[in-house]
Image (cartoon, rainbow, N blue to C red):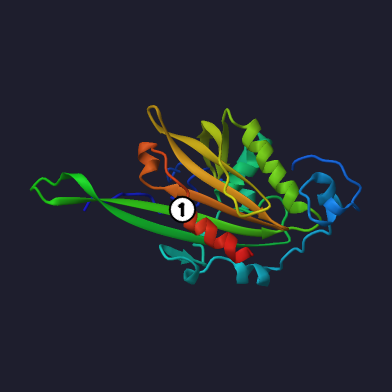
Amino acid sequence: MRTISVRSTALAASAASLALLVTACGGSGDGGTADDSKGKADSSTAAAAPAAKALTSAELEKVALAQADVKTGKVTDKIPAKDDVAKDQVSADNETCLPLIHAQLGIAQAEPAASVKRSWTGQTETQSEGSGPDGQDMTNVDVNKMMLNLASYQDGGAEQALAALKKAAEQCAGGFTATAAGEQTPIAEVTTTTAPDGGDEAVAFTLGVPTGKDVNAPLKVVVVRKGATLASFSAVNLSAMFTGKDYDVPADVVDAQLDKLG
């Protein structure tokens, strides 16, 4: 069987530390119209509506992804210390870009009221077109890893944090340099991609990390807001880390977490 060799920190430090390879529409209204009472999605309604409740750590634990919620892969609720990069260990040469690295590393945006982490690892095997040296069948092993972070916010903090993340994805498109746990990594490009449905608003982007001549490893991030909670998904495909080939963020895992948030 063909195997893939990766350094042990390849999930959490993948974006900011290449030591493992090395993170509403507008409208008018006065807050009292019939359209507002029906929940019309515009900025004036959002301002008039009561703020969504910030979940406590205990409440986030209850709605965080669990093994029973997914049909494939392994869910872990204890993140190893080597994979759990602290916020104060992360920086960027352009501060506007910092939210991107936080998201990639599974670090909560801004200052949440509470947050919890999970990780998910999944593996698929497909028959290789080639054969081994002795004519034996070969199997391609494709491994996906994902860091999940649920964070709740008070006083509109979730909306503000997501807005800062969207701004970072736009303004840092040309790249920047990130540092995590003392390891410096260039981010060659930031590409905004299609965000999933299932929340109040969302953003998705890909960080391109140079890994060789004309190869950028794609590190993918999806962040979805549901009320006062941000659900962040940071995905790495271990084969793509070496080949630069595109891949999809596992939609079944994202959907399972968003469904559990309600």
- For label 1, the residue is 250
In which quadrant of the rendered image does the C terminus lie? Answer: bottom right
Q: Position of residue 116 (x, y in %)?
A: 61, 63
Q: Position of residue 146 (x, y in %)?
A: 48, 54
Closest to the observer, 93 or 156: 156
Task: Name the residue located 47 percent from the left edge and 69 percent from the top edge.
Answer: 67
Task: Name the residue located 36 percent from the left edge and 49 percent from the top edge.
Answer: 6
Q: Is residue 227 above or below residue 189?
A: below
Residue 106 in view = no
Residue 130 in view = yes
Tell me if mark 1 has few (under 14), some (14-19) or many (20+) residues whose alpha carbon lies within 10 angstroms of its own. some
Q: In the picture, residue 62 is in which quadrant?
A: bottom right
Q: Position of residue 213 (x, y in %)?
A: 37, 27
Task: Name the residue located 64 percent from the left edge and 54 percent from the top edge.
Answer: 199
Residue lying farthest to the left in this orientation:
134
Residue lying farthest to the front in this orientation:
34
Closest to the observer, 198 or 163: 198
Task: Name the residue located 38 percent from the left edge and 38 percent from the top edge.
Answer: 245
* Secondary structure under the numbered disc 1 in the rendered image: loop
Q: In the picture, residue 99 is in which quadrant?
A: top right
Q: Amino acid at mark 1?
A: Pro
Q: Position of residue 153 (x, y in %)?
A: 74, 58
37 relative position to 66: left or right: right
The mark total stands at 1
